[in-house]
Image (cartoon, grey):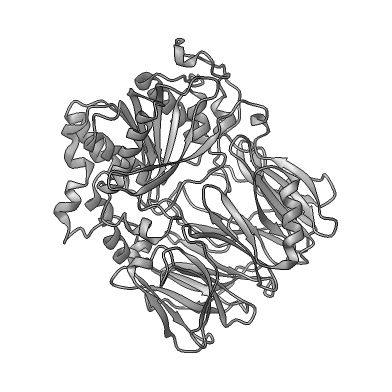
Amino acid sequence: MERHRISRRTILALGTITLSLVVLGFGAATPARAGLPPLIPREVIFGNPERTSPQLSPDGMYFTYLAPEEGVLNVWLRTVGMTDDRALTHDRGRGIRAYFWGQNNQRVLYIQDKDGDENWHVFSVDLAGGEPRDLTPFEKVQAQIVSVDPQFPDVILVGLNNRVPQLHDVYRVNIMTGESTLEAQNDMGSAAWVADNSLRVRIALLPTPDGGFGLLHRSAPDAEWKDLTKWGNEDAMTTAPFGFAADNSTLYMVSSVGANTAELRTYDVTTGQEKTVYSDPNYDVSNAMIHPTTHVLQAVAVNRDKEEWKVLDPSIEADFAALAKLHEGEFQVTGRDLADKTWLVVFSGDKGPAAFYSYDRASKKGTFLFTTRPKLEGLSLAEMRPVAYTSRDGMTVHGYLSLPPGVEPKNLPTVINVHGGPWYRDGWGYHPEAQWLANRGYACLQINFRGSTGYGKAFTNAGDREWGGNMQNDISDGVKWMLDQGYADPKRIAIYGGSYGGYAVLTGLTKTPELYACGVDIVGPSNLITFLNTIPPYWEPMKPLFYKRIGDPVKDEQMLKDRSPLFHIDAIRAPLLIGQGANDPRVNRAESLQIRDALQQAGKIVQYIEFPDEGHGFARPANRITFYAAAEKFLAEHIGGRFEPAAE
């Protein structure tokens, strides 16, 4: 529910907010605020990055990045070695957040939807500029990038649900002309596809009735689909294929079948032989680095308290050693040219902006490019500390604590910031909301409650049918841990979150009203039955998985009602702020409207903000700044932190 995946090449862009300085304001002084550093403007934390998401053209001749043009994120182009930067796109709406290079070095491609409806279109723009070409010009149709391959520079594979809204067929699309031909028709109910290194769709991921998955395989585009392998619901969240080796017979997978954690494995599609390449006994494999032309596995990452890389290919050992000395923090190779001479590398830490470098493999030297938010440099930011505690039933729960700098970490106003998904996890690093809250004087606790991913399938599966149950208990136990440590003032605790996190906010206010002084819910479901009955059509193949993990609206109706905050509003004592996008395809706006209306009729305190041009989250600059301004004022009123008055 929290994130969409476009392809392994997708770059997740940062949020978009117009940068402008405003007059800073402070609430009345309190003892907890005395030593806090100066208030950081919202625009500096949440605004447009000055530059982000750099990419190299396949031939290494050009360098692109995202940066604002007239306050909106667009793709900019620079010739390597020159300073001829210019905007290549000129979006004036939601901004461009994900883009990639066409392999012919002539086009840059990006995705865009309409007002957050997630009906993504794929656009192609020539390096000479001009109007972008819409490669998928269909109304109310969602495009998904399936594969891009340098051997086929003018062609990409795109999934489109233009025939049946519930299913994506795969088309071969020419990025120069827009011409498309059918590559694979989805007659079997596939939820995802894998192409080989000859740009042929070879693998279909098929949901099974028990909430598990199976793989179908074909040897050629005109060959029959045949069953390859399958796994049950216990491995559904920790097993998936993601690409082929150079021989087009060896499939790369992460898999927990026969193990607790997601391991990096190879699977021979002709013999069925499976081999574990790398595993960790306690944590799932989180990332892998693959050579762009040889398709050799080169490195693998595991996200423990922090993400840690293990080199698999000896040819890059010296490069990783050099990068470890280049800049502090975690690093990741985010791009490279096809000759593999130059890498783009991002370094990230918890107390500052991401820093990008160009790295020359021959000299083993790095050249600094930019940081995403230079106005953050030198400011007093909060350390993000990995923490762990034991839940009431004995399970170890991990999370991250950010304390406001400059004040004694005792009896602080506190915000429990719950991640979405829920099949996701918070990780270490710079987190805008954590820094925002800490700067305003709050302790911020982020909890990877059971059901979160990354800690093995037993931990993820412990969240099955526990929405509003033990998943919520883990959050409540996190509040107790904060109180036991002396960090939190028991009368000044808020719960805050988006998507599943928004549901946890509503559940916290109804299930444990004594814990919270207020709540902030962003696009959270209020009724699990209506939520499950209004999922977007392209999620239909995933219904068995949702029913296994959450509950069946028919068979489990009473249980889902018991777990739905809408039916328990009488228990709510604390004020609530709700934020919603009118076009949200994942959590329908009715989820927010129905609880807003019920609270108003019951005489409860509820503040509602809806944006008519947003979906599952707020992308437009003005909307984002409006909501964060309202949220920090709301928190200040109810638990006593600082706030910056909204610009007039």
* Residue 472 percent across, percent down from the top left: 29, 44
Decide which of 24, 31 is in the foreground and name it: 31
- Is residue 166 something one can see in this rendering? no
Q: Residue at x 36, y 62 (%)?
A: 539
Query: Taking 209 as reference, is 606 above or below it?
Result: above
Total labels drawn? 0
Residue 494, quarter of picture: top left
Q: Position of residue 89 (x, y in %)?
A: 66, 49
Q: Is residue 631 shown left or right of residue 620?
A: left
Q: Quadrant of residue 311?
A: bottom right
Position above or below: 75 against 402? below
For residue 69, side relative to residue 535 (left or right): right
Q: Nearer the viewer, residue 513 or 533?
A: 513
Residue 80 in percent (x, y) is at 81, 52
Which residue is located at x 62 percent, y 57 percent?
309
Q: Nearer the viewer, residue 18 or 55?
A: 55
User: Which x, y percent locates residue 13?
Assistant: 58, 47
| Left or right, 444 with reference to 44 | left
Residue at the left extreme? Answer: 558
Q: Can I make out residue 244 in this image? A: yes
Residue at horizontal 44%, vertical 59%?
Answer: 139
Residue shown at 22%/41% (left/top)? 565
